[in-house]
Image (cartoon, grey):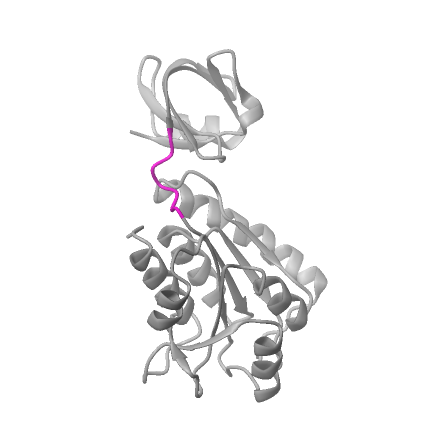
Amino acid sequence: MPRFFVAASNIFGGVAYMDGKDAEHLKVLRVKKGEEIIICDGQGKDYICRVTEVGGGSAEAEIVETTVSAGEPSVSCRVYAAYPKGDKAETIIQKSVELGATEIIFFPSERCVSKPDTSSVAKKLERWNKISREAAMQSQRGSIPAVRAVGSYNEAVSEAAEADLPLFLYEGKCKIGLLDAMKNNDGFKTVSVVTGSEGGFSPEEVEKAEAVGLICASMGPRILRCETAPLCAVSAIMLYSGNL
């Protein structure tokens, strides 16, 4: 059954109203009056609807049934990734959304090869949020994870430290592994996953992360690429918490 995200403000009186690209997509899929579709309000609710009107750049669908979105995990997992080079950010976004991440945040670090300026970040964010939306639709999420950027490394780690399980994934020497970090914080509801760029983190950055409360955790003896590490961590978190 085709699935669409529609703003909650466009769902009222037992009817969901679609316009713009959503209505256009309905036509591309050749959905006709009388056919059923799923509309999600982006806030965790799914509406099974029967299309009643299509045409003129808009569409209407009568709500048949309302359910809680099954695609949302029971834990909130934010991915904090240092700017990677090339199109690796797009991979991180797409796969993180599919796996269940709540939000993806990019930040500059000392060893980043890519350090986009403010105007460049704004353009990238527009595209990155579109990728998140498409991935959320494809994977039947109940919300669209936001993609944003923070201006400094300090801001990123300070923000990440607020989670129940604040993970700082490091390829160097760590006192604890990822699995034990989860076991030691069993029952967590919010998680932060902080990962580095191609060059990893400097010793000073590791010290800063630990100073603000992040848990320096190892992902094993193998060195993972910067686009692989966050996806591996999110997968492990979802599996451990019963969401995979």
The quadrant in which residue 117 appears is bottom right
Q: Residue at image x 42%, y 64%?
A: 185
Q: Residue at image x 35%, y 13%?
A: 33
x and y percentages locating residue 52 in the rendered image: 40, 11
Q: Quadrant of the N terminus?
A: top left
Q: Is residue 7 above or below residue 53?
A: below
Task: Looking at this view, name the residue that lies furthest to the right.
Answer: 118
> Front-most of 113 and 207?
207
Q: Is residue 41 left or right of residue 49?
A: right
Q: Is residue 192 above or below residue 229?
A: above
> Front-most of 90 and 240?
240
Q: Residue at image x 38%, y 46%?
A: 73
Q: Please tell me how many numbered marks the rendered image carries.
A: 0
Q: Which residues are magenta?
A: 68-74
Main secondary-structure element of the magenta-colored stretch: loop
Magenta stretch: includes residue 208: no
x and y percentages locating residue 154 in the rendered image: 67, 72
Q: Is residue 173 above or below residue 239?
A: below
Q: Residue at image x 39%, y 46%?
A: 74
The quadrant in which residue 82 appears is bottom right
> Front-most of 167 and 145?
167
x and y percentages locating residue 243 in the rendered image: 31, 50
One can see residue 111 in this view? no
